[in-house]
Amino acid sequence: MGFIYPIGQGCIYAMRSQQEWGKLPHMQQTFRDAFLAAIKSTGKSMRQVALDAGVSYEQLKNLAQGKSKSTNVDDAVRIAASFGTNLEGFLEGNTSPVDRPTIAIAGKVGAGAQVPVFDAYPKGGGPQVECPPGLTPTGIVAVEVEGDSMEPVYSDGDLLFYSRNGHDSVPSDIVGHRCVCEDEDGMGWVKQVKAGDEPGLFHLISLNPGANNMWNVRLKWAARVQLHWPADLAKKI
């Protein structure tokens, strides 16, 4: 079964195969050529393109490695859109970096003596990261995992996104969830929070089975982790 796709002003090509589509006479380069050029000119990773376009990373990897020179029309349109252009513009090399809203990185979190204080950067002076697809940036901040103390759940360089419900607040719905939190001594943690033995106290359960748990801790604030973003997907600004 072929594809029908409009090209230019009122001109329609009926294609019986992806190979035929990739060799249309008006095209100056194959879809693979255009894809490799777009990756080079914009600096986007293939994983980011896969997420933005909603296509398989393996599909893009095969394309980049030359195992396939084209793709189906629907995916091609989505890939082009992820670079901020339409399919015709994409094949002509008209791509540019896609502007995304950014989220501030408040600091880093680790374990034991490696845990730094939150808000480690001057206001407005810290690093930013592109807002991941599907996440609304308003009111969201991120912390960067440091070290291997949270393996195998979180790894060094991963980003955790959260939103604080008030400056000093410990919402009731955090119990049982993985949270970013600060204890009364000003130390930051990423733990699973459980109810303590008395009101106002909490047990902080380590994500690494070999790490120590903390019992009956009083918290200044806690916020559920809304999104875990692996280090190789994060694009810092």
Image (spheres, helix red, strand yellow):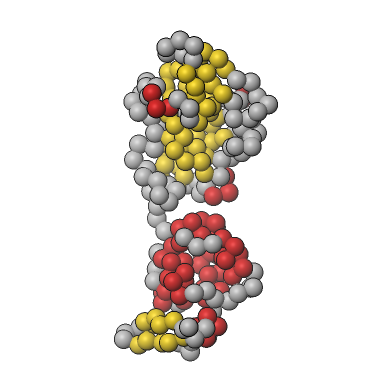
Task: Classify residue 67 by image quadrant.
Answer: bottom right
Q: In which quadrant of the rendered view does residue 81 lie?
A: bottom left
125 vs 153, left or right, is: left
Image vertical order of residue 229 relative to residue 205, above or below: below
Q: In this view of the protein, can residue 11 be seen by the observer? A: yes
Towards the viewer: 19 or 31: 19
Indicate the position of residue 131 as horizontal and vertical percent values: 42, 47
Residue depicted at x 59% and y 62%:
58
- The answer to which of 227 and 109 lies nearer the viewer is 227
Tell me: residue 167, above or below residue 139: above
Instruction: Please identify the residue farthest to the right as the structure is shown.
Output: 210
Q: Is residue 117 visible?
A: no
Q: Residue at 51% of width from left, 60% of height from top?
A: 50
Q: Position of residue 190 (x, y in %)?
A: 53, 28
Residue 32 percent location from the top left of the image: 56, 74
Residue 82 coordinates in the image, percent (x, y): 44, 62
| Residue 171 versus residue 69 in the image, above or below | above
